[in-house]
């Protein structure tokens, strides 16, 4: 079993839709939960992070962590064509390596 | 704050040659990480430094790979006797202590012919 599981998609939605991206993980010791956005041939860009369980909102983006289910989510409201990218969930312990999901490719159609 | 800087952005080399990449982290970050990413995959951890000390190395980091961070500032990743399987994007990230929120550079894309 992989440490982090993420559906690679692709996911195609119309402009303005609510997008839901999800990952599951296996190691209950993970404490930091991050979402990165990566455009083609670019480095990952940190979108949001949460420490431990709960929700965090930043503009059109909401990150949720459910440690009891080992499940993390990213919601994008009012999706825009510029949101088209690959979204990577990433999880780590205190100072260790970050373990990434495979990434979900999102396309927002105008 | 200019973010994490990586050079070169793209390196094309012939099989068997040595290559070296450089990473300049965000200035106040004492942790520095190297990852490798192949097409359609998430980044995979290679190694990490706290200041100048290399504290962890992945089993992906074969004997042909070496990384240094001599003064706890910039870091270099060298690949000796490159193979076609080394073709990938090499990513550098840095994070402040004690949080482990990592910020990535744009990466160096290596093509081994």
Image (tube, coloured by chain):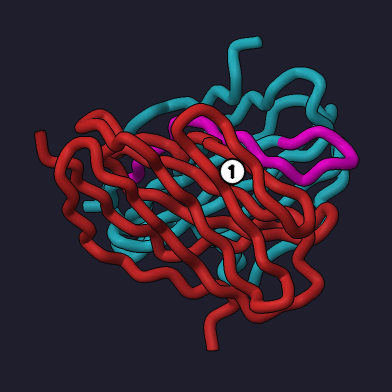
Chain colours: A red, B cyan
Q: Main secondary structure of the magenta part?
A: loop
* Residue A80 percent coordinates (x, y): 25, 31
Residue situated in front as seen by the camera: A43 or A11: A11
Q: Is residue B104 above or below residue A24?
A: above
Which chain contains the residue that carries disc 1?
Answer: B
Residue situated in front as seen by the camera: B104 or B109: B104
* Residue A20 percent coordinates (x, y): 39, 56
Q: Residues within 10 Å of mark 1 (few under 14, many from 20)?
A: some
Image quarter (top left, top right, bottom left or bottom right) of the N terminus of chain B: top right
Q: Is residue A84 above or below residue B25?
A: below
Label 1, secondary structure: give it.
strand
Q: Is residue A38 left or right of residue B99?
A: left
Residue at (61% x, 49% y) in the render: A34
Q: Which residues are magenta?
A: B95-110
Label 1, on which residue?
B77
Judged from this view, the residue extending furthest toward the bottom is: A1
* Residue A22 percent coordinates (x, y): 46, 64
Tell whether position A46 is magenta. Answer: no
Q: Is residue A109 above or below residue B8?
A: below
Q: Is any atom of residue B80 visible in this view?
A: no
Residue at (19% x, 46% y) in the render: A107
């Amino acid at each position: 079993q992989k440490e982090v599981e993420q559906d690679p998609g692709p996911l195609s939605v119309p402009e303005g839709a609510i997008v839901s991206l999800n990952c599951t993980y296996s190691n209950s010791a993970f404490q930091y939960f991050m979402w990165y956005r990566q455009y083609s041939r670019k480095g990952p860009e940190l979108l949001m992070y949460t420490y431990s369980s709960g929700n965090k909102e930043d503009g059109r983006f909401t990150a949720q962590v459910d440690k009891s289910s080992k499940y993390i989510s990213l919601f994008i409201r009012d999706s825009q064509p510029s949101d088209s990218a690959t979204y990577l969930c990433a999880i780590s312990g205190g100072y260790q390596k970050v373990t990434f999901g495979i990434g979900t490719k999102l396309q927002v159609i105008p | 704050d200019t973010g994490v800087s990586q050079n070169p952005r793209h390196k094309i080399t012939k099989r068997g040659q040595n290559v070296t990449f450089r990473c300049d982290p965000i200035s106040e970050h004492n942790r520095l990480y190297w990852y490798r990413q192949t097409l359609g995959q998430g980044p995979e951890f290679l190694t990490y430094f706290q200041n100048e000390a290399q504290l962890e190395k992945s089993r992906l980091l074969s004997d042909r790979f070496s990384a240094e961070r001599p003064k706890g500032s910039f870091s270099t990743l060298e690949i000796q006797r490159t193979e076609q399987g080394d073709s990938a994007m090499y990513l550098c990230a840095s994070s402040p202590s004690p949080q482990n929120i990592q910020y990535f550079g744009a990466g160096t894309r290596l093509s081994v012919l």
